[in-house]
Every structure is written in structure tokens, then in C-alpha cells.
Amino acid sequence: MLREHRADVLSCARCSPAIPGGVAPVVDVPKKVRAMLVAQAPGATEVVTQSPFTGPAGKRLMGWFERAGTSREEIYLSAIARCFPGKAKGGGDLVPPRTMISNCRPHLARELELLRPELVVPVGGLAIKELLGIGRLSDAVGQEIVRDGITYVPLPHPSGASTWLNRSENKERLAVALGLLGDRMAALRQRGRGSINL
């Protein structure tokens, strides 16, 4: 089922021709996991590699995973939008427009349905707002939020363009969040992965 879903996402052209540089959806490979990360959108590197979090932000995120005692193999990597929305004039990536978010929403809904994750890690302001309705990173990062049987452990975006982590209190929030992520992943590991139809 996840393999079919991946093929569907890779062939998606809902946003064409509105995407600068053309449609190039990025989707993770199927994994038998009960943890899911939801980020904003792929970057320029991910379009080339066709794999989520392979650029500079991905390297930083993998460092956070290591601090939490986990790895990309244990977490399904997803996003609010599946195509690169383009570069902002002032640097960094554009935030996906509402039409792109709406067009990609069924992909995320299908992944949630197929994986039935016990743990979801929203990464960055957009993912946190879309999934939890929380508008400020400082109100979410470092918290464990349980809704409808799913535990959410929000993280800030690992992009170098983000200045949020420049403040010491936000670094402390990240440390707490990574501790929570490590605890949740250890609990999932103990219970096993369950049956997921790839």
C-alpha cells in the first residue's frame, strides 16, 4: 500500500504549471515504522536527490536525530507540500502557497491512514500550525501534545535561515524536545513495529 502511495505521489501533477522549475514531488521510501515526521516542503537538494532531508537542513536534522538516539530509518519522513516551492528573494525557501498545501493534503492524509503513527514530529512553524493549530514555535517546541491517540513532539525547522535557535531559551526547548523524542522512540522500539502493509 505504501509503495502504491509513493508511486501516486511521484506521478502527481496537481500544482503544475504553478511551481517554479516544474513539478518534482519528493516522497520517502516505504518503511515499517510507527513514527512520522512532517516538515514544510522539500528544498532544492531534495528535488535532485528525490529523497527528503538530504540537503543542509537534513544534515542538521540527522544530527538532532542522533542526539535523540534515533535515525531516519526509524521515522517516515513526510511534508505538508511535496514539491519545492522555490527560493525566496531574500534567501531561504519560499513557504508553500495555500493552493499547494491544499493539493498535497490528500497525500499526507493517506500516509496517516496507512502508517497509523503513534508518534508524529511536526518540524517547523508551518507543519506545527497545520497539524496542531499552534502559531508560535515557543508554545510548541519542548512540549508533548496528545491528540486522538497520537503523540506529537514538535521541533523547530533545522534550516540555517531560521534564527529561532539563536536564543538560549529556544536551544533549551530543543534539548527538551529531543529528550521527549528519544523517550517516545525508545518506547516504540520496545513495542515493535507492528504490521504495516508496504
Image (cartoon, grey):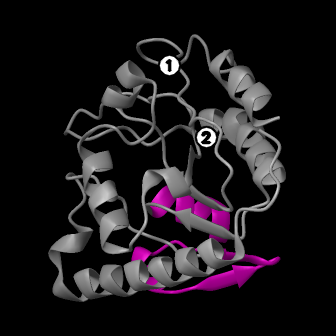
Task: Give the quadrant of residue 192.
Answer: bottom right
Q: Nearer the viewer, mark 2 or mark 1?
A: 1
Q: Secondary structure at mark 1?
A: loop
Q: Position of residue 149 (x, y in %)?
A: 80, 78
Task: Give the quadrant of residue 62.
Answer: bottom left
Task: Give the quadrant of residue 35.
Answer: bottom right
How crowded pointer 2 is (Cα within 10 Å; few <14, some 14-19, many 20+) is rated as: few
Can residue 133 be seen by looking at this rendering?
A: no
In the displayed structure, 60 sits above or below 191; it is above
Q: Please state the extent of the stretch shown in magenta in the rendering.
A: 125-151
Q: Position of residue 139 (x, y in %)?
A: 47, 84
Name which residue type carries label 2.
Answer: Arg
- For residue 98, which numbered disc appears in the image? 2
Q: Position of residue 148 (x, y in %)?
A: 82, 76
Give the residue drawn at x 63%, y 20%: 10
Q: Nearer the viewer, residue 37 or 16?
A: 37
Q: Nearer the viewer, residue 86 or 64?
A: 64
Q: In 3D space, how far apart are the residues under numbered discs 2 and 1 (Cα atoms)?
A: 12 Å
Can residue 190 be seen by looking at this rendering?
A: yes
Name which residue type carries label 1.
Answer: Ile
- For residue 19, which numbered disc appears in the image? 1
In the displayed structure, 13 sits above or below 155; it is above
Give the mark nearest the N terminus, 2 or 1. 1
Disc 2, disc 1: CB below 8 Å?
A: no
Look at the image and tell me in which quarter the N terminus lies: top right
In the displayed structure, 176 sits above or below 49; it is below
How crowded pointer 1 is (Cα within 10 Å; few <14, some 14-19, many 20+) is rated as: some
